[in-house]
Image (tube, rainbow, N blue to C red):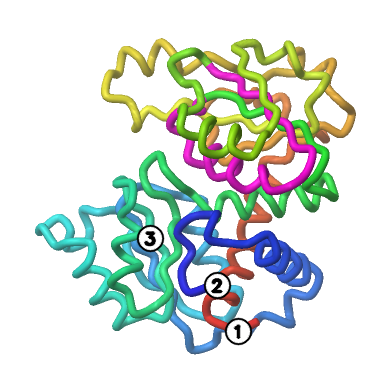
Amino acid sequence: MKHLIDIKDLSVEEIDELIEVAKDIIKNPDKYSKKCEGKILATLFFEPSTRTRLSFESAMLRLGGNVLGFSEANSSSTAKGESVSDTIRVVGEYSDIIVMRHPKEGAPVVAAEKSIVPIINAGDGGHNHPTQTLTDLLTIKCEKGRFDNLTIGLCGDLKFGRTVHSLISAMVRYPKVKFILISPEELKIPSYIKKEVLDKNKIEYIETQNIEEYMNKLDILYMTRVQKERFFNEADYIRLKDSYILDEEKIINSKKDLCIMHPLPRVNEISVKIDNNPKACYFKQAKYGKFIRMALILKLLEEC
């Protein structure tokens, strides 16, 4: 594995290996504290990010390495018209590994073709977000103890939600996984995901607009925000942004061990009153993100 652009770049065995390394990091942090001493991670974020960027920076620092980069396109030479290819070629001379987020789908593929160092896709438009998926997988493994025989509810923006698309692509490789796809008509899962991923793998799924209808069946509820930045029409965003607000009443009939996840940032789709509920796993999820990214950096730099 030289780059990570799409979660499908990883085999089930490679995912399992990364998860085991992450779990070992959680148990034995001192063992890994100098693994990347002398190495430099470059963070090229052409689109805003808090958790993903900072978790990568924290991951590299926890491994004993160093970090350089920028957090918005306007602070880079992109503002002067420099191409992604040229940026990658130059930054590759200054670093050992590059993490990149870009608003254009496919930009990390171009970067990987030109880079002399490993590229990690930290999100490209509404397409892919593989390291969030690895975060989600580690969360599921640690909180549920398995990947098979799970009913997963995906709720909110399923059209533009790259975290949803990547998670579906990862989970269809495990047996007896079912999906409940909860969204307004305008934000339904794209037809290509249904055809090329769900139908192709003969995965059972139900589409609904009612979040409470199947609540008692769910092992995992994955909430997402309606993403203002993906809308061309602000009126459509305003109309749809509060389609689903998860509160205590809506989870009354849920399973005792329901795991509520969210890739964050949250706007108001989960009531803050749920935060202290033992079913709420989204802040744990953010913590797990650091550990799986540490494991991924080690893997790509061949330090484990």
Mark 1 closeness class: few <14, some 14–19, many ≥20 residues within 10 Å: few
Residue named by callout 3: 100
Instruction: Give the numbered dot on residue 297.
Output: 2
The amino acid sitting under disc 3 is Met
Q: Secondary structure at mark 2?
A: helix
Q: Secondary structure at mark 1?
A: loop
Q: Residue at coordinates 55% horizontally, 66% vertically from top-left?
A: 58
Magenta span: 157-183
Q: Is residue 133 above or below residue 240?
A: below
Q: Residue at coordinates 77% horizontally, 65% vertically from top-left?
A: 23
Q: Quadrant of residue 12?
A: bottom right
Position in image of residue 150 (x %, y %)? 79, 37
Whichever of callouts 3 and 2 sits on the residue coming sooner in the sequence is: 3
The amino acid sitting under disc 1 is Glu
Q: Is 170 within the magenta?
A: yes
Residue named by callout 1: 303
As drawn, is 208 to the left or to the right of 17?
left
Disc 3 to disc 1, how far (Cα)?
Answer: 21 Å
Q: Are marks 2 and 1 in contact (CB under 8 Å)?
A: yes
Q: Residue at coordinates 72% horizontally, 49% vertically from top-left?
A: 139
Instruction: Give the numbered dot on residue 203.
Output: none
Position in image of residue 304 (x %, y %)? 65, 82
Mark 3 closeness class: few <14, some 14–19, many ≥20 residues within 10 Å: many
Disc 3 to disc 2, how far (Cα)?
Answer: 13 Å
As drawn, is 186 to the left or to the right of 265?
left
Q: Is 46 within the magenta?
A: no
Disc 2 to disc 1, how far (Cα)?
Answer: 8 Å
